[in-house]
Image (cartoon, rainbow, N blue to C red):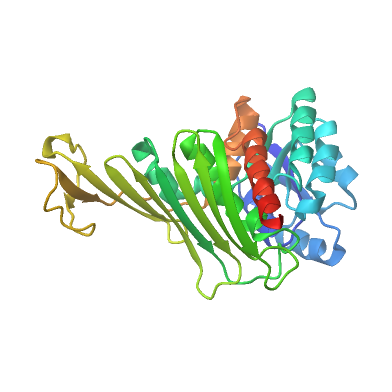
């Protein structure tokens, strides 16, 4: 099978990870890299024994597909060049700086028959994959995504940098229109919002509370999902999941379940209803590598991408609304 020739544009912290993984992918060939910082690019090219392109035009000419990991402000202009030349694009999140730019790329990709996949990597987190069969009707979702301060990615707010992961996951889970947004945020270190708390209300009556911070002492990436007859706890950082089920004995068709009292005893509970604890098996995988595999599979087999530009644009649209509400 012919290998897909992939380039990486932007080899900072995340771009370098992409380049390393592409160099080891069985279905792709890392054809080369480009970065505006010549010394950084030269170092990565030497380490991975791949070509260092002298400009983006050369990368476009040699590539079948590309990974764009430049600063968000440059996503649109770089992706536009590749798409206009019929090259598939994997674009790191957020897809673009603005929703308007995202829609423009979507239209351009459709015109040129090009696939765009967006790097919402938490969609590939094995903890999330382990509980997909339990996601029936989320009613209340609580999220805490806290990070220690890092100088990179400060060109966007914590909403576009961190919270957008959870916005994307929640939209994918709930599958209902948002009818209300309450939001607060503050700037502490940067000129954009470093801490934000958001409440999303959906047409189907679901509610989601999201907190994101990039100036926390202790990192945390947790999501709690409450729905009829079960409660799910996800730890994205440690890649673990816990499921509590409320059901009659005969309704439990899972192995390795055990009686659970961690949610408290229900002394006045419904007759024959019990709380069970289930620990889903989580397959330890490299989420970015899984992103790559999905991207390559979509290109080779001409199938829909795992995280589409339209989905990423919707998450960005909500992020913009949140930012606007906080600014007002």
User: Quadrant of residue 186 in the image?
Assistant: bottom right
| In the image, residue 185 above or below residue 177 | below
Report the side of 284 relative to 277 (left or right).
right
Image point 66% across, 56% down: which residue? 326
| Residue 220 picture location, percent across and down | 48, 65
In-image side of 325 versus 172 (left or right):
right
Report x, y in % for residue 280.
31, 48
The picture places residue 19, in percent across and down from the top left corner, at 69, 53
Is the C terminus in the top left, top right, bottom left or bottom right quadrant?
bottom right
Which residue, as the protein is rendered here, is positioned at the far left?
Answer: 271
Residue 14, quarter of the rendered image: bottom right
Q: Is residue 167 visible?
A: yes
Q: In the drawing, does residue 259 fall left or right of residue 129?
A: left
Q: Nearer the viewer, residue 31 or 238?
A: 238
From this viewpoint, which residue is outermost toward the bottom? 217
Q: Quadrant of the N terminus?
A: top right
Q: Indicate whether 313 appears above or below 35.
A: above
Q: Position of residue 172 (x, y in %)?
A: 51, 38
Which residue sits at x=51%, y=68%? 219
**Left or right: where 191 falls relative to 297:** right
Q: Is residue 257 visible from the viewing direction of this image?
A: no
The tally of labels here is 0
Residue at the location (67% across, 36% down)? 309
């Amino acid at each position: 099978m012919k290998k897909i020739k992939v380039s990486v544009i932007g080899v900072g912290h995340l771009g370098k990870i992409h380049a390393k993984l592409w160099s080891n992918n069985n279905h792709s060939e890392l054809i080369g890299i480009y970065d505006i910082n010549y010394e950084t690019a030269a170092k990565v090219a030497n380490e991975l024994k791949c070509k260092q392109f002298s400009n983006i035009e050369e990368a476009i000419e040699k590539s079948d597909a590309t990974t764009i990991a430049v600063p968000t402000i440059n996503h649109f202009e770089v992706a536009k060049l590749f798409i206009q030349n019929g090259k598939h694009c994997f674009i790191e999140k957020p897809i673009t700086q603005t929703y308007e730019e995202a829609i423009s790329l979507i239209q351009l990709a459709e015109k040129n028959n090009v696939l765009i996949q967006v790097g919402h990597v938490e969609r590939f987190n094995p903890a999330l994959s382990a509980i997909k069969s339990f996601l029936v009707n989320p009613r209340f979702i609580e999220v805490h995504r806290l990070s220690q301060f890092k100088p990179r990615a400060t060109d966007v707010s914590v909403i576009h940098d961190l919270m957008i992961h959870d916005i994307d996951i929640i939209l994918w889970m709930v599958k209902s229109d948002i009818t209300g947004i309450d939001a607060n945020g503050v700037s502490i270190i940067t000129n954009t919002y470093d801490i934000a708390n958001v409440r999303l209300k959906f047409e189907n009556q679901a509610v989601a509370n999201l907190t994101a911070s990039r100036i926390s002492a202790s990192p945390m990436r947790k999501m709690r999902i409450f729905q009829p007859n079960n409660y799910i706890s996800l730890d994205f950082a440690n890649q673990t999941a816990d499921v509590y089920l409320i059901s009659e004995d005969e309704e439990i068709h899972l192995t390795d379940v055990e009686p659970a009292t961690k949610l408290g005893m229900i002394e006045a509970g419904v007759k024959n209803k019990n709380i069970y604890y289930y620990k889903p098996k989580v397959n330890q995988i490299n989420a970015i590598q899984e992103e790559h595999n999905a991207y390559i599979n979509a290109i080779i087999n001409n199938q829909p991408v795992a995280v589409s530009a339209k989905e990423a644009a919707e998450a960005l649209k909500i992020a913009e609304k949140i930012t606007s509400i906080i600014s007002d």
